[in-house]
Image (cartoon, rainbow, N blue to C red):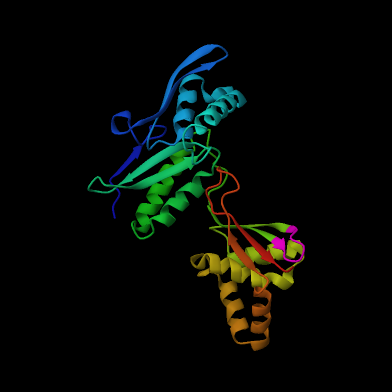
Amino acid sequence: MNLLSLLSLSTIPLVTAAQSTLLWANEIQSDGKSLGRLEIFDGQEAVDSIDSFVNTHIGTSNGSDFVKIRNSILDIVCEAIACNRRVPVVYRKSIIDEKENILGFIEVYENEEVVDAVSKFFKTTEGKFDDETIDTVKDYVISEACSNDRVLCSRDAAIAFNQMINNGIDGTPIGRLVILENEDPADKVHKWCEEKNILQYYDVIVDAVCSSNKGMCQQSQAAELLHSSTSTNSSAMNDVEEKHEHVELQDMKHLNDNARVDDYFATCAC
């Protein structure tokens, strides 16, 4: 599919006042000074509307004061209406096809890595775009979004795997294993296991990594060799299966709303 248009919506609400019902409204004051009337409509996320309001009247240059005022207003609003998150979207890009149909939105949260947000969008819209379009949109969005000082642009590769590995006996954390899209999973796991002195569980962790994201391991020669060797060695296979009885992959909600990459917690008897 050819991409014809990219529209920057930034902090513009997705729902206008004329389209929806007013849920909450009040005059906002700070240090005895009126900042104006804040209105939140059905279909808008409270934190986005509040963030835009505070940004307009105070500005993000005030740093901690900006966040403090925003959170204070958010606490009050969320007592009256439903709030789904506490971290605002600070960059939004709509993706439109040749018939001007909106295919989705690339959204970047405050203090989020732009490359992670872009990668997640294309994972959720897999098959809708050709490789050339994906590369073009990635380059465009990353270049534009990184001019926003409220997002992070510290790396050029997205996170493909992010799990905390815990000791299956006493539950103590061994460490967090993070693999980027441009890293070989088997190589990264091997180095990580060496650092943690748990090489005896390398095969179990590689298997867990590849099971959670099969596409990530398709190009991993080391992973293919590993699975080939274990499949031809019955004792090794039995050992892997025995270890897998102690491995539990549990989907978890985000530890905080800044995270856009799914967090998992893996437990192994290490």
Q: Residue furthest front?
A: 80
Q: Residue furthest left?
A: 99
Say which quadrant the C terminus sits in. Answer: bottom right
Residue in the image at 60% along x and 68% along y = 208
Q: Position of residue 67 (x, y in %)?
A: 57, 28
Say which quadrant the N terminus sits in. Answer: bottom left
Residue placed most toward the observer, 90 or 42? 42
Residue in the image at 49% along x and 24% along y = 54
In this rendering, the answer to whether 43 lies above or below 195 is above
Residue in the image at 75% along x and 58% along y = 172
Q: In the picture provided, is 97 more to the left or to the right than 24?
A: left
Q: Position of residue 160 (x, y in %)?
A: 54, 58
In this rendering, the answer to whether 115 lies above or below 221 is above
Q: Position of residue 11 (x, y in %)?
A: 42, 32
Residue in the image at 60% along x and 64% along y = 249
Q: In the picture provided, is 244 more to the left or to the right than 119?
A: right
Residue 152, quarter of the rendered image: top right
- Count of numbered labels shown in the rendering: 0
In this rendering, the answer to whether 78 lies above or below 223 is above
Residue placed most toward the observer, 146 or 123? 123
Question: What secondary structure prevails in the magenta region?
Answer: loop
Q: In the picture provided, is 60 more to the left or to the right than 4?
A: right
Any magenta on residue 136?
no
Q: Residue furthest top?
A: 32
Q: Which residues are magenta?
A: 166-173
Residue placed most toward the observer, 125 or 263? 263
